Amino acid sequence: MTTVHHQEVVQLLKQIIEPILKNDIVSLGMVRNLRIVDDYIYLRLYIGSHQHQLQPEIQSKLSSLSWCKKTYIQICTIPGVKITLAISSGKGGVGKSTTAVNIAAALKLQGAKVGLLDADIYGPNVPQMLGLGQADIQVINTPTGDKFLPLEVQGIKIMSVGLLAEPNRPLAWRGPVLHKIITQFLQDVEWGELDYLLIDLPPGTGDAQITIIQESPICGVILVTTPQQVAVADVRRNIYMFRQVGVPVLGIIENMSYLICSDCGLRTPIFGSGGGEQLAAELQAPLLGQIPIDSRICSGSDTGNPIAISEYTSPAKEVFTQIATSLNTTFTFLLF
Ligand code: ADP
């Protein structure tokens, strides 16, 4: 009976369309942890700060079920944040943080209010990529309790697990401690009003990643890979992990796709070509961009000047700009 009821609930929830994204709330990954116990429905609703009208709509829709005594909805949101996106990768070193920082910078340049949460416990290097040294995180008192105050650089609000660690020491958090720190980072940062919060996830599919995905209202994930990595199982595992918890995969970015000859402009795919397109087709996720190898990306990261906002034009900068434009088109209401 419970299975039948479960199916009935899902059918009804699928009739509720998120008006801006024009898709149903189940496909958008907004409904999670759906349970039916003794004719009571329990669910978690993961929404942005502008989507609270969905709660009464769900209540009203499910009230049509004759057997349902009551629906309990737990709202999961990050205060002030409209769109939460995760940047993920199958393994480290493929340019995930570089991509996160540059997309954040490109979005900022296009007028969005952007925050970047560096949750990469294995290599929290976002602060360095934005030119932040070891800074003290301030805690402020708010009506909803004590909150961390994010740092701000290049107009982007930053919070990083790296800022909590001692310099040059690995973060050795495990199990419940890790869980607590991550959920604190998601709930206890005073972001203010943000259009986008980008979360730079740790690479892979371990406890830390799953906790972040389950605890945060992620609207979609962008997967970063390199041509050498595309055929590798952990990229697929990564995508399946998101799909399993119901988080939509917005697309794939292939980094270090080709090298451009500085004399003749010829593009050489030194790590092979076509892999990103193949992976995108196989996993039915769009290829959002192919970023060239460019020493200025590397030097920009070292000096805290992301290429996406550097003064000169370059093919890499163009790709980041295009990705930001396409995100703004997907979430078009933010600009108005
Ligand atoms: P991850 O977050 O996946 O571990 P990082 O973003 O830290 O990877 O990048 C690893 C290194 O590769 C950094 O030194 C970064 O500057 C460099 N890098 C990333 N993408 C490029 C690129 N397209 N061209 C040149 N260097 C890059």
Image (spheres, grey):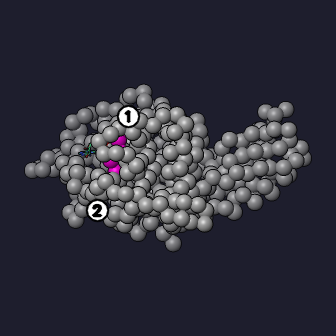
Q: Is residue 213 left or right of residue 230?
A: right
The stretch of residues the image draws in magenta is 122-126
Look at 72% across and 58% down and name the residue there.
55
Tell which residue pokes out farthest to the top in this image: 233
Q: How many neighbours does mark 2 have within 10 angstroms: few (below 14), some (14-19), or many (20 or more)? A: many
Specify whether tag 1 is near ligand 1 (CB below 8 Å): yes
**Residue 138 location, x and y as percent?**
43, 61
Q: Is residue 61 left or right of residue 227?
A: right
Look at 14% across and 47% down and name the residue there.
261
Ligand 1: give its quadrant: top left
Look at 28% across and 62% down and name the residue there.
309
Magenta includes 125? yes
Does 46 appear above or below 138? above
Look at 33% across and 65% down and name the residue there.
154
Does 318 appear above or below 109? above
For the N terminus, the quadrant is top right
**Residue 212 location, x and y as percent?**
52, 43
Tell which residue pokes out farthest to the bottom in this image: 336
Can the viewer see residue 202? yes
Q: Which mark is residue 309?
A: 2
Q: Nearer the viewer, residue 124 or 104?
A: 124
Specify the amino acid type for callout 1: Lys
Q: Main secondary structure of the magenta part?
A: loop
Q: Is residue 145 left or right of residue 231?
A: right
Identify the residue position indicated by label 1 in the image: 91
Tell which residue pokes out farthest to the left in this image: 263
Which of pointers 2 and 1 lies earlier in the amino acid sequence? Answer: 1
> Distance from label 2 to label 1 (Cα)?
26 Å
